[in-house]
Amino acid sequence: MLQALLADWLAQAGRGLSVHEAGDDLSQQPALRARVATYWHTYRAHLPEIQALGQIAGGGEPIGRTLGDDEAIDTLTGLLRHGLTGPRS
């Protein structure tokens, strides 16, 4: 049941992104950030259910510190844009 909910949330986020003003060219920073923000806010809105999925999967306790929404979105956008090695010089 939780997996069906997750699929539904992702579909809802995808529908919202299909008409987003930032467009869908992920090589452009605004479009990439819009997608990260949409999925981040979807995650935050359904955090208890997503944590339950992690516990079912044996994920255990989260590690690290809690990030604010903007910091998390910027961090995830940077990782998607540049990978783990950071921006290229």
Image: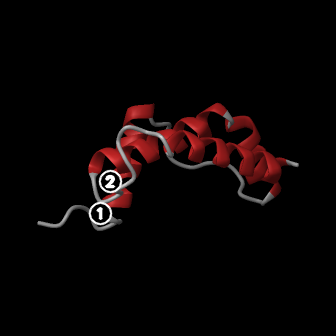
Task: Answer with left or right where residue 5 lies relative to residue 42.
Answer: right
Which mark is on residue 78? 2
Q: Can the viewer see residue 42 in this picture?
A: yes
Whether residue 68 is visible:
no
- The one nearer the camera, 48 or 40, is 40
Residue in front for this viewpoint, 87 or 36: 36
Q: In what element is the residue under mark 2?
A: helix
Alpha carbon separation for disc pair 1 and 2: 6 Å
Q: Residues within 10 Å of mark 2 (few under 14, many from 20)?
A: some
Residue at image location 29% in from the left, 63% down from the top: 82
What residue is disc 1 on? 82
Q: Amino acid at mark 1?
A: His
Left/right placement of residue 57 relative to residue 64 reads right
Instruction: Give residue 21's position: percent from left, percent from top.
Output: 37, 37
In this rendering, the answer to whether 67 lies above or below 5 is above
Most distant residue in the front direction: 19
Where residue 60 sits: x, y (%)? 72, 54
Where is residue 4 shown, x and y percent of the image?
81, 51
The answer to whether the residue labelled 1 contacts the one labelled 2, judged by CB atoms less than 8 Å apart, is yes
